[in-house]
Amino acid sequence: TTLFRSRYRETDNIAGKCTLGRTIYNMKNLRTFLYDAYWPPFTPDIAEYDPGKAIKTAVEMGANAIRMASIGKWAIYPSTIMPQHPELNGRDLLGETVTLATQAGIKVIIYIPIGHALPYRLLSQYKPQWQFYIDKDHPFTPEDDYFQMRHFGGEEILPPCLFGPYNRDILDVVKEIVSKYDADAIYLDGPYQ
């Protein structure tokens, strides 16, 4: 699902391009450059990501839109809900990239994966209330048969429980992102349970 957000008010007469306060973009005309938080340039050294170089590369490749990850396995912006990637120390990769893309005239689609597996460390140390339980006393751990391996060489990952506090919290993450960043669209992906 992609949600569109407008820079225009419903009262602005944009020659029929404004419906219920939202600008309608023809997605078929977008040449989108994908930035996923578990692929280079974010992995293996996320703190070395250079948004200026990334936007320059997108422009050189003829992109007129980017799809930028927001939470991936960790938040790549300072979130009040989702733990931020430990190597970022408060740095806002999402904000830096959205600002530069907008200045370059590139549309921004913020990608929010919902219900995707998360690092075991994030679940066990920072958000134990999101853990998926085998039974009421036993959360999934790396020792369980179901345990997923490393996603593209990263940390060990497990699915969160979509029916507990994660459900409310992930909706709050979506609200946080939509209220904080001026994206042209939001791409929600998932859930997988």
Image (cartoon, rainbow, N blue to C red):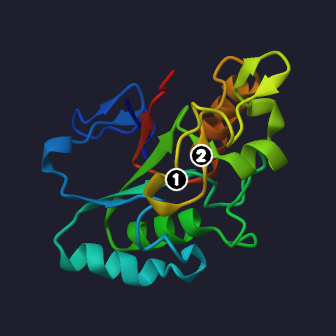
Measuring from the top left, give residue 40's x and y in whole percent.
Answer: 41, 71
- Residue beneath the point at 18% across and 74% down: 61
Q: Quadrant of the N terminus?
A: top left
Q: In this view, does 7 lie to the left or right of 131?
A: left
Q: Is residue 169 left or right of residue 75?
A: right
- Residue beneath the point at 60% across and 57% down: 155
Q: What residue type is labelled 2?
A: Ile
Q: Earlier in the sequence, mark 1 or mark 2?
A: 1
Measuring from the top left, give residue 89's x and y in whole percent.
Answer: 75, 73
148 shown above or below 139: below
Q: How many marks?
A: 2
Q: In this view, does 135 lie to the left or right of 34?
A: right
Label 2 crowd bin: few (<14), some (14–19), many (20+), radius 10 Å: many
- Residue beneath the point at 69% across and 46% down: 120
The label shown at residue 150 is: 1
Q: What residue type is labelled 1?
A: Arg
- Residue beneath the point at 48% across and 69% down: 97
As helix, strand or loop, the secondary structure at mark 2 comes to: strand
The label shown at residue 157 is: 2
Measuring from the top left, give residue 146's x and y in whole percent.
Answer: 57, 31
59 shown above or below 142: below
Measuring from the top left, give residue 139's x and y in whole percent.
Answer: 76, 29
Marks 1/2 in contact by CB < 8 Å: the verdict is: yes
34 shown above or below 125: below
Res 82 visible: no
